[in-house]
Amino acid sequence: MQKMRFYLNISADQYQAYYMGAAKFVNVRSEDGRTLKFPASELQKFISHNGIQGRFEITFNEQYKLVSLILLS
């Protein structure tokens, strides 16, 4: 399994576009410079009144299927 770490800073207003279905995927650049695209719905558990902020780690299998997404800090 592979892991990638990245930072997110999405305001509550910005996340509204994901929630309303206008954007189905989130594109990020990992700490090691790779780009990553994953379903925006995976972020729902991390939303707060301020939006979504923090350092995350995503794990995916050999077929690039998402296994887990956790908030590190």
Image (spheres, rainbow, N blue to C red):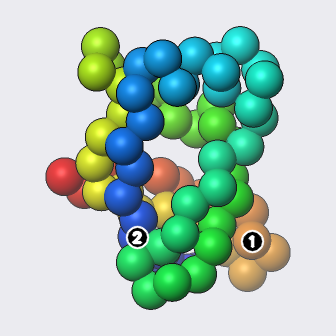
Query: Dot 1 lies on which element?
Result: loop
Tell which circle, 1 or 2, labels the residue nearer the N-terminal end: 2
**In the visual, does 15 lie left or right of 55?**
right
Q: Quadrant of the N terminus?
A: bottom right
* Residue topped by disc 1: 64
Name the image quarter holding residue 56. bottom left
Q: Number of numbered discs present?
A: 2
Give the residue type at disc 2: Arg
Residue at image point 53% right, 25% down: 15
Give the residue at x 30% y 57%: 55
Disc 2 element: strand
Of the residues shown, which amino acid type is indicated by label 1? Tyr
| Vertical order, 57 against 1 (above or below) | above
39 in relation to 64, above or below? above
Q: Residue at x 28, y 48 (%)?
A: 54
Is there a contact, CB below 8 Å, between mark 1 and mark 2?
Answer: no
Q: Which residue is mark 2?
A: 5
Classify 10 Å Cα crowding around label 2: few (below 14), some (14-19), many (20 and above). Answer: many
Please name whichever residue, 55 or 64, is drawn nearer the observer in this view of the structure. 55
Position above or below: 40 against 12? below
